[in-house]
Every structure is written in C-alpha cells, then in structure tokens.
Amino acid sequence: MGNNTSRFEKLLVKNGLKRTVPRLQVLEILSGRDSATSQPYLEQVMGKDADRVTLYRVLQAFEEKGIIHKVLDQQGTANYAICSDGCSAHEHHDEHVHFNCDNCHKIYCLDTVKIPALKVPAGFKVAHLNLIATGLCASCSGKVN
Amino acid sequence: MGNNTSRFEKLLVKNGLKRTVPRLQVLEILSGRDSATSQPYLEQVMGKDADRVTLYRVLQAFEEKGIIHKVLDQQGTANYAICSDGCSAHEHHDEHVHFNCDNCHKIYCLDTVKIPALKVPAGFKVAHLNLIATGLCASCSGKVN
DNA sequence: CATTTTAATGCAATTATGTTGCAAATATAA
DNA sequence: TTATATTTGCAACATAATTGCATTAAAATG
Ligand SMILES: [Mn+2]
Ligand SMILES: [Mn+2]
Ligand SMILES: [Zn+2]
Ligand SMILES: [Zn+2]
C-alpha cells in the first residue's frame, strides 16, 4: 500500500485503536481524495474487503476520536473527511465552511473560510455552527453554465 | 378541525393542489407547532390516517410549491416547517438560520437571523447558504446545565 | 514465543427511510 | 351528472443504519 501506512498506524495507536486492515484501508482512501467521501462511495470502493457494518463502526470510531469529521450534504448523505491536526476525541476544530457542488456533488472543506459569529435571539446558547454552501466548485464553474 | 381550514384550503387552491384530507392534515399539524417537524413525527401522528407514501408525496408537493421548506438536522433527519409568505414555487426565501437544540432536538427557524455573506476561494460560485446552529434553545437553556 | 486478554470483525436479523409502478378512489371541471 | 385529471393506497423494492452474538485478530503479558 501507500507510504502513508506507518503514519496511519501511529495515528491509530495514538488514539488507542488497534491497527487493523479495514481501518488502514479507510484512512488510505480518505487521504487520497481532495474532497469529503460519501459512505456509499466508501462502501463501493471497499467492496467485499470489509463488511458494511465494519465500515460503519470504523467511521464511528474515527469520528469519536477526532480523526475524521462527518459532513451531511444537501440530501442528508453522510460524507467524511480527515480532520485537521488540532482535532481530538475531546474537541473538533472543524468549524469551517463546507461547499457542496451542485454539479459534481463533491464536498470541499474550505478550511480557510471561518464561519462568522452569529447573533441569536435571547436565551439561545450556540454551541456549534455548521455552514454548508451550495453552488459550483472551482472545477465545475468553468465547465457548466 | 381547526378554524384554519378555510385558510389552508385557499392555500392549496392557490398552488393548484387539490383540497384533500391528508394535505389539510399535514398543514394542520405543521401550523400547530412552534418548531420544524420531523418526518418520523409526522408519520407517527398521522398514523393510519394516511399511507406513508402519501405523506412523502404531500411533503414533496408542498416543498415544490414553496408552502413548506425542509431542514436536515444534525443526524440527517428531514424536518419540515411552513414557509414565510414570500415563498413560492419559483423561489424560496428561507435563507435564515436554523437552530437545532441538543437537548429537546427541536429545530427552530430563526427568521430574524440572516446568514452573513461569505468570502469563498476563487472559482467557487455560491448559490445558497445553509447555516444550522446547535446548542440549547431558549426553553432548554434554563433547565439543563 | 506461547498464552491470555481485549478489541474488532463478520454475519444474520431487524429497523428506518425513501422510491417506483400501477390500479382504485376522489376532487374538480365540464 | 359525467368526464378528466389528480391523488391516494398498496405492494414491492432500494438503501442506510443498528443490534446482538459468535468468531477472529491484535496487543499485552509472562
Ligand atoms: Mn470539513
Ligand atoms: Mn426555516
Ligand atoms: Zn463541482
Ligand atoms: Zn431545546
């Protein structure tokens, strides 16, 4: 496999997770893509290498440990992306904007775009903000329309 | 039924939809709640009064006509709320913030809070913004924590 | 290195959500 | 009242996700 293997093995150990084939496989796939990856796509790529249930459990464990974060697209489908380094089991630092392309349906993590603070009605206590923009991504905006 | 009936009947006619029992029922339920209503809840309340498929189709028709709008909560569950008056089949004017309470799980339409404009990387063309805040709602922030 | 312990996987079954095609029923127009 | 167009209900199917449990594999132990 890729030369990321030892890096990923360390990542698993650091988070108290055993170094297993399905886990390394998921990390390999996610890291090789420029946008968030949907559960159905992951399932398709892994094929019969891993059981569907295992995939769900791998993703859940990774999310809890702060290794990946989940983004729901406009259809409600779960998509996963590797977290930035600052994330941990205790806190995710992924409060960046996500961009869901209407054409290619990719979901980009716009790490550089911060979500502006928000004024909410009295009484409401905001814990997290989740902003998803839709439209055309840089790659598609040239081709269509 | 409620005294909203004739108002809802007019709403249906205005949108070229026939005045049917399941449709009036859905409008009655949605209008009687202070927050967005999940599909599972609707299904449960309607019970055997209407087929599941009918409910899906009613919701879809309403959404297309601009009568209601759909909000996905943090779990990806569909929730529906009646649109403000400005909405139509051609355009929804519901680009307001939604608030998903971590405690009671209600979804509030914060109609008064506008989503701030956003600077995105070159090439990206934003069509719509979808901001969902999580935390504690006004009703829950007093009780818990 | 062999063994014990613990964590993770695979499989089967079940639930929830959503879709499609089509015949029957119903609302509205004629 | 009859014709028409829409809507509904049913059955079947599809996909996403969860749970329990036996088996397997990884890491810890000695
Ligand atoms: Mn992200
Ligand atoms: Mn709303
Ligand atoms: Zn694109
Ligand atoms: Zn609440």
Image: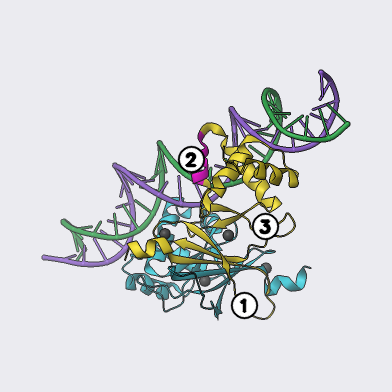
Chain colours: A cyan, B yellow, C green, D purple
Classify mark 1: residues with Cα within 10 Å, few (<14), some (14-19) or many (20+). Answer: some
Task: Write down the chain letter for disc 3.
Answer: B
* Residue A19 is one of the magenta-drawn residues: no
Q: Which residue is nearer to you in this view: C8 or A21?
A: C8
Which range of residues does the magenta coloring cover?
A: B40-47
Do the residues bearing badges 3 and 2 touch, measured as CB atoms within 8 Å?
no
User: Which of pointers 1 and 3 indicates the residue nearer the eye?
Assistant: 3
- Kind of residue at badge 3: Asp
Q: Which secondary structure, mark 3?
A: loop
Identity, as a three-letter code, of the amino acid under mark 2: Gln
Give the label, 3 or 2, closer to the camera.
3
Ligand 1 within 8 Å, label 1 CB: no
Q: A44 and B97: which one is in front?
A: B97
Looking at the rendered structure, the kind of residue marked 1 is Leu
Secondary structure mainly formed by the magenta segment? helix
Question: Can you identify the residue that label 1 sits on?
Answer: B118
Dot 3 beta carbon under 8 Å from ligand 2: no
Q: Quick check: B114 left or right of A14?
A: right
| Residue at (60, 60) in percent of width and height | A74
Q: Earlier in the sequence, mark 1 or mark 3?
A: 3
* Residue at the disc numbered 2: B44
Q: Which residue is mark 3?
A: B85
- Element type where label 1 sits in the image: loop
